[in-house]
């Protein structure tokens, strides 16, 4: 069942009676009701009022490949045949990995909705229809898996760069690769690698950014989060953000291929919201407390304990230890 015509009609923010929708779309009223329920199951918040009909509580601009390519300017032409926008999929990472197995060296997939979005450590990434950016980039490296140390931190830095270029403020990173805005999680990264330890390899970089999350999805998210719509200074424009992400990732990954993480360590430390703070690192049953000293040139977290500075290569900073921001999202 193709839901795109209904979404397009409802995207203007106005009320549409069921009878008018039926006539416009050439389907029965029963089909309209079925489609409304399917959209709700995909996380779309739809208001229904007797005598008025249905509407979305916000204007919804769909992701548009042609607009993104235009925003990329001269670089857009080289992406045209390596770039798909899909209405719904299981996982954009899975789609990009399949392209890689089929022989592609570079490919970009963006979905309006993910039915099985994945986060790090097996967590679910909530992806309601039209509410965020769910994109995966397939990228090939020639130096092998051993040369990819720190890649996830690089990607987090590049995402922050892209969002800043779009006018968003109060942004920072949390080791190893979370993007925060006003101390709450805004975006996440999932990287999957296939290939040879020393030879060519392919990487799928999944980026999920909350843009305008409906309140109905809050119960499915197990941590404090924020979306771009919460930024009072900039109205979210997903197409503009996607174009900025593509440009930032394309330039940054080329630089990473030449310099490795060492070329990005200073940039990471400049946006690390936990640097200089007391933190606790959790890895399985192991817990370590100390002061975060930023990251090394390999991407390891430098932790000042009571007796020494140690390098931590795996684990999570506990969510309870959050930096404090003021109302405008600036570090207080």
Image (tube, rainbow, N blue to C red):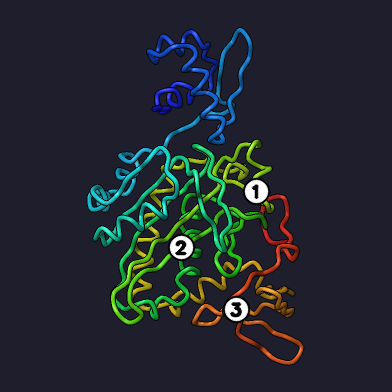
Q: For this view, does 280 lie left or right of residue 64?
A: right
In x, y percent, where is residue 192? 43, 65
Mark 2 secondary-structure assignment: helix
Judge left or right: residue 279 versus residue 75.
Answer: right
Mark 2 sits on what residue? 158
Circle 1 packing at 10 Å, graded few (<14), some (14-19), many (20+), is few
Q: Which residue is drawn at 47% across and 75% down?
A: 150
Query: What residue sits right under mark 1 in the picture?
Result: 221
57 over 302 or under it: above or below: above
Pick the residue in front: 76 or 10: 10
Q: Residue at x 36, y 69 (%)?
A: 194
Query: Does the residue at mark 3 contact the one at mark 1 (Cβ under 8 Å)?
Result: no
Asked if the residue under mark 3 is in contact with the one under mark 2, i.e. CB atoms within 8 Å, the reply is no
Eye-nearest disc, 2 or 3 = 3
For image coordinates 59% across by 30% down, the residue present is: 45
Mark 2 vs mark 1: give the one in front. 1
Pick whichever of labels 3 and 1 is earlier in the sequence: 1
* Residue 15 image position (x, y, % from top left): 55, 16
Q: Earlier in the sequence, mark 2 or mark 1?
A: 2
The residue positioned 30% from the left and 60% from the top of the image is: 100
- Local SS, label 1: loop
**Dot 3: few (<14), some (14–19), or many (≥20) neighbours within 10 Å?**
many
> Could you tell me residue 314's position as x and y percent?
59, 76
What is the crowding at mark 2: few (fewer than 14 residues within 10 Å), some, or many (at least 20)? Answer: many
Tell me the quadrant of the picture where the C terminus can be found: bottom right
Cα–Cα gap, marks 2 and 1: 25 Å
Q: Which of the 4 quarters of the picture holds residue 177?
A: bottom right
Residue 301's disc is 3
Question: Nearer the viewer's eye, disc 3 or disc 1?
Answer: 1
**Can you say whether 317 is above or below 84 in the image?**
below
């Amino acid at each position: 069942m193709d839901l795109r015509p209904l979404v397009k009609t409802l995207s203007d923010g106005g009320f549409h009676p069921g009878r008018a929708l039926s006539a416009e779309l050439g389907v029965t009223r029963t089909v309209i009701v079925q489609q409304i329920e399917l959209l709700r199951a995909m996380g779309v918040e739809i208001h229904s009022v007797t005598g008025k009909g249905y509407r979305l509580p916000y204007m919804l601009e769909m992701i548009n490949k042609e607009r993104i390519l235009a925003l990329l300017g001269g670089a857009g032409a080289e992406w045209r045949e390596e770039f798909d926008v899909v209405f719904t999929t299981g996982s954009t990472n899975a789609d990009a990995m399949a392209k890689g197995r089929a022989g592609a060296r570079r490919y970009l997939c963006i979905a309006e909705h993910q039915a099985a979005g994945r986060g790090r450590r097996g967590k679910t990434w909530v992806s309601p229809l039209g509410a965020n950016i769910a994109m995966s980039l397939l990228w090939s490296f020639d130096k092998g898996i051993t040369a990819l140390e720190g890649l996830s931190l690089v990607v987090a830095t590049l995402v922050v760069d892209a969002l800043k270029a779009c006018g968003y403020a109060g942004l920072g990173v949390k080791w190893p690769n979370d993007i925060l805005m006003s101390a709450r999680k805004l975006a996440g990264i999932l990287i999957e690698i296939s290939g040879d330890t020393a030879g060519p390899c392919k990487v799928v970089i999944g980026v999920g950014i909350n843009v305008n999350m409906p309140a109905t999805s809050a119960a499915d998210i197990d941590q404090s989060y924020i979306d771009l719509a919460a930024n009072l200074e900039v109205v979210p424009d997903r197409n503009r953000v996607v174009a900025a992400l593509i440009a930032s990732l394309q330039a940054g990954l080329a630089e990473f291929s030449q310099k490795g993480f060492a070329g990005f360590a200073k940039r990471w430390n400049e946006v690390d919201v936990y640097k200089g703070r007391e933190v606790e690192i959790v890895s399985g049953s192991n817990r370590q407390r100390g002061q975060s000293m930023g990251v090394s040139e390999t991407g390891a977290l430098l932790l000042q304990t009571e007796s020494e500075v140690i390098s931590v290569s795996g684990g999570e900073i506990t969510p309870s230890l959050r930096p404090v921001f003021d109302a405008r999202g600036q570090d207080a």
